[in-house]
Amino acid sequence: MHGNCGGRAERSPSYEGWPSSREDHGWLPVAGGYPGGVPPSTPIRPLVLQPVVAALAADDAVLIADETGDIKKGTKTAGVQRQYTGTAGRVENAQVSVHLSYGSGKGRTLIDSELYLGKGWAGATAEHERRCAEQGIPPERANAVATKPELARRMLERALAAPVPFTYFLADEAYGQCRALRVWLEEHQVRHVFAVPKDEVLPLPDGRTRQARELWALVREDAFERRSCADGAKGPREHDWAAVQPASVSTGLERHLLIRRSTVPNKKDKKTGALVREIACFLCHTHPDTTLAEMVVAAGQRWMVEESFQVAKGQVGLDEHEVRKWCSW
């Protein structure tokens, strides 16, 4: 994200990982250019990060990765192709981007983004090279597809380098089932809570492996605790919660499978048609003294990224931009 206004600006703070201008001139670009030539763009993202962190940093602050899509009619805009987007709930001609949201009890907002380039854009053919060159897409993104979990990792790296203070990194199943991302987080001792599919295979302390659904089926009824993870429009969002500890990790953190069960039968069983309680699973990496209550609260904070998207689209037109080239990202 770069400036799109005229005038002179302060040089942005030095945040490792964000691109910086090639010359120390401090100008922001305008559409009409400058007398005497157009200087390189100055990135806005690190410029606004410092006041955002100052305003929102708190003991309960979290970082959340998620994606959103914008429906497009043409084919020229960087990243546009037929692909699934949750915005429409189906495959559409769309541009999809991964965002990083920062939130706490003080508020929440989007602080970083990466445009997703699928196989229609990232590749080694002459057509790939031509399309990417037209839109100014750099070679490191044009030559190969970077997955959405990989894009989330890059943004998290920038947040860690800034540094942005936070307790947990949160994401849904699309990121939670990426083992490469989970390994990277473990190696960097980043506490996280990820939604994972019920068929996710987890290692046990005795060396065996079991799917998440097999582990929650073994949990005793008296092990569940009724707790609210957050307040919703109709009051506290209560579920029954329990935790199982799979094999430990070697980084000083503990691994837990957090299980959320609805308080009443509310979902039809695909085989029997009977109403059953809905189950959701979360893989948590936490400090050894973390309580079930703390994990429940952390898991319930992921809604903040959805609110960030709604506000960004409703108030500043996140989904109505008309920019085509890479430099806008």
Image (tube, rainbow, N blue to C red):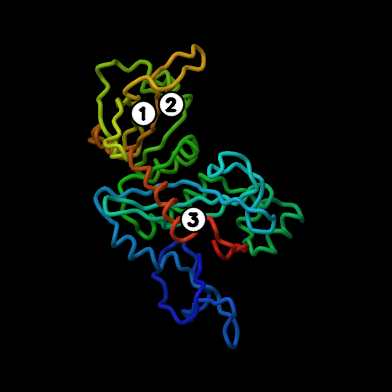
Are circles 1 and 2 on residues that touch, CB within 8 Å?
A: yes
**What residue is shown at x 63% (from left), y 61% (from top)?**
137
Residue 19 horizontal side relative to residue 137, left or right: left
Using the image, determine if residue 89 lies above or below residue 219.
below
Residue type at mark 3 is Ser
Residue 202: assigned label: 2
* Residue 317, image x, y percentages: 49, 59
**What residue is shown at x 46% (from left), y 79% (from top)?**
26
Q: Which residue has dot 3 on it? A: 113
Work out how far the residue at label 3 is from the one at label 2, CA to CA, in angstroms: 31 Å
First reached walking from the N terminus: tag 1 or tag 3? 3
Residue type at mark 2 is Leu
| For discs 1 and 2, the disc positioned in front in the rendered view | 1
Work out how far the residue at label 1 is from the one at label 3, CA to CA, in angstroms: 29 Å
Using the image, determine if residue 102 lies above or below residue 20.
above
Work out how far the residue at label 1 is from the one at label 2, CA to CA, in angstroms: 9 Å
Q: Residue furthest bottom?
A: 36
Residue type at mark 1 is Leu
Q: Which residue has dot 1 on it? A: 257
* Badge 2 element: strand
Residue 164: assigned label: none
Quarter occupied by the C terminus: bottom right
